[in-house]
């Protein structure tokens, strides 16, 4: 698929269709029903994507903190 290879042969129309389906599949995977997606406006889709990205970032930050905390606890055990 030319789009994944970054080929210069991708037309604007192909890029638009590709982006549409990437967003649609992402939202379906997140549990938003197909009929709901069909009724959503572009602004609503952007809002949902933004909230989803913020929640994902928050989860990643919490995991990073948790890993850092557990690593520092295990390092403390070596100093006794």
Image (cartoon, rainbow, N blue to C red):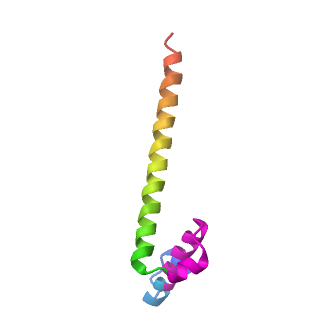
Q: Residue at x 57, y 70 (%)?
A: 32
Q: Main secondary structure of the magenta part?
A: helix
User: Does 78 sit above or below residue 42?
Assistant: above
Q: Is residue 56 above or below residue 36?
A: above
Residue 61: horizontal and vertical position, in percent? 44, 45
Front residue of 11 and 47: 47
Q: Position of residue 79 (x, y in %)?
A: 49, 13
- Magenta stretch contains residue 31: yes
Is 62 magenta? The answer is no
- Up/down of 42 relative to 70, above or below: below
| Magenta range | 17-39
Residue 75 spot, x, y in % from top left: 50, 22
Count every numbered label the image shows and give the total: 0
Tell me if residue 13 comes above or below residue 31 in the rendering.
Answer: below
Q: Is residue 4 visible?
A: no
Q: Nearer the viewer, residue 39 or 52?
A: 39
What residue is drawn where x is 45% and y is 38%?
Answer: 65
**Horizontal and vertical percent position of residue 17:** 51, 85
The residue that appears at 42% across and 57% down in the rendered structure is 54
Task: Pick the quarter of the image with the N terminus.
Answer: bottom right
List the single residue furthest toward the top.
80
Whether residue 37 is visible to the viewer of this picture, yes or no, is: yes
- Which residue sits at x=49%, y=18%? 76
Q: Nearer the viewer, residue 10 or 58?
A: 58
């Amino acid at each position: 698929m030319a789009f994944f290879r970054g080929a210069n042969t991708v037309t604007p129309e192909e890029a638009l269709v590709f982006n549409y389906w990437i967003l649609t599949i992402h939202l379906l995977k997140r549990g938003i029903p197909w009929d709901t997606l069909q009724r959503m406006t572009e602004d609503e889709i952007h809002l949902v994507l933004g909230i989803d990205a913020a929640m994902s970032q928050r989860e990643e930050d919490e995991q990073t903190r948790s890993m850092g905390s557990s690593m520092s606890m295990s390092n403390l055990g070596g100093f006794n």
